[in-house]
Amino acid sequence: MKIFQGLEELEEFNFPVVTIGTFDGVHFGHKKILNRLKETASKFGGETVVITFYPHPRMVLFPDDNDIKLLSSQEEKIILLEKYGIDNLIIIPFSKEFSRLTSLDFVRSILVNKIGTKKLVIGYDHHFGKNREGSFEHLKEFGPVYGFDVEEIPAQDIDEVAVSSSKIRNALSEGNVELANTFLERKYSLKGTVVKGDQIGKTLGYPTANITIDFAHKLIPAFGIYLVEVLYESKKYFGALNIGIRPTFKNKKPQTEVYIFDFDEEIYGMEIEVLFVKKFRDEQKFLNLDELKNQIEIDVSDMKNYILKNNLH
């Protein structure tokens, strides 16, 4: 996949079949659009072109909204689109100035003059341009004038899939990682750097890796104890992940920490990725460290039994 940062150094595309969107999470619901893009490009011997934006438009239009949570960082989105077999990815720098571009100017200056779009495939009820004024109806008008065809994925096709980024966010916010994984067609994951914690886990015999998440706007699932896969230096391990404030110790700041099964390496400062498999329980407060240690033993035993029972590798 060729990646173009901005519109200044685009190549000449061969019968470009184009779609536009933020594609947060690149989930199952996006599959209809991307597959149709590929089918059309194949039919005409053309190239697929995905236009997306960075930063995410909401970050620019609502800079004071610290609650914006996304399913994927820009790096993750690029990897996922490449896995879908997209030929070209154009990342347009999103700014307030760009947001004021009218729908006609967007079509004329970008889709036509910069890219030479031959076919545009968009999702149902897609809007673009200044104040989201552009719609499928606008595009149907512009298409014949500027020499490109427009196809909208029908509403019933989108409804059949019944998947959206907001539904996935809601599932994760409720701790339902299994449902989120079904919608995503992969395990939801967090990437981060291991930092030094207060070493309480180590004193209990269950040393944890405290993780600082790399992407500040990444959605963190609901507080609780999860079975996860842990990727470190191309190797996979299983682990018990705790997300929360650790009420036993009267913490107030949420933390993400993982006890990695059958692992004994010093990994401070290293990057790891955790992939969510299943939530086992909510966070709870214990009267003392012995109670906490006993519960950790139960959690780890239950998780290892689950791994064996479900033949997870």
Image (cartoon, rainbow, N blue to C red):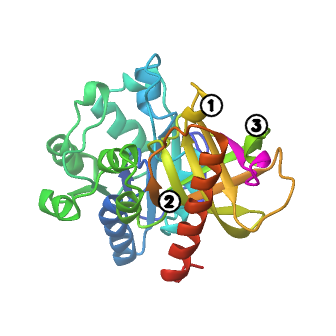
Instruction: Indicate the quadrant where residue 189 lies.
Output: bottom right
Q: Earlier in the sequence, mark 2 or mark 1?
A: 2
Q: Is residue 191 above or below residue 286?
A: below
On the image, the x and y values in percent for residue 277 come to 49, 64
Q: Which residue is mark 3?
A: 197
Asked whether residue 94 appears in the rendered view, the answer is yes
Q: Which residue is mark 1?
A: 249
- The amino acid sitting under disc 1 is Phe
* The magenta stretch spans residue 211: yes
Q: Is residue 210 left or right of residue 242?
A: right
Which mark lies nearer to you, 1 or 3? 1
On the image, the x and y values in percent for residue 282 come to 44, 47
Residue at left offset 42%, top offset 40%: 110
State the extent of the magenta-drawn residues as a range: 202-212
Asked whether residue 11 appears in the rendered view, the answer is no
On the image, the x and y values in percent for residue 232 come to 74, 61
Q: Is residue 242 left or right of residue 187?
A: right
Distance (Cα) linking label 1 and label 3: 13 Å
Q: Is residue 124 above or below residue 297?
A: above
171 or 217, which is in the foreground? 171
What is the total number of numbered labels drawn onto the structure image?
3
Q: Which residue is mark 2?
A: 13
Which mark lies nearer to you, 2 or 1? 1
- The amino acid sitting under disc 2 is Phe
Distance (Cα) linking label 2 and label 1: 59 Å
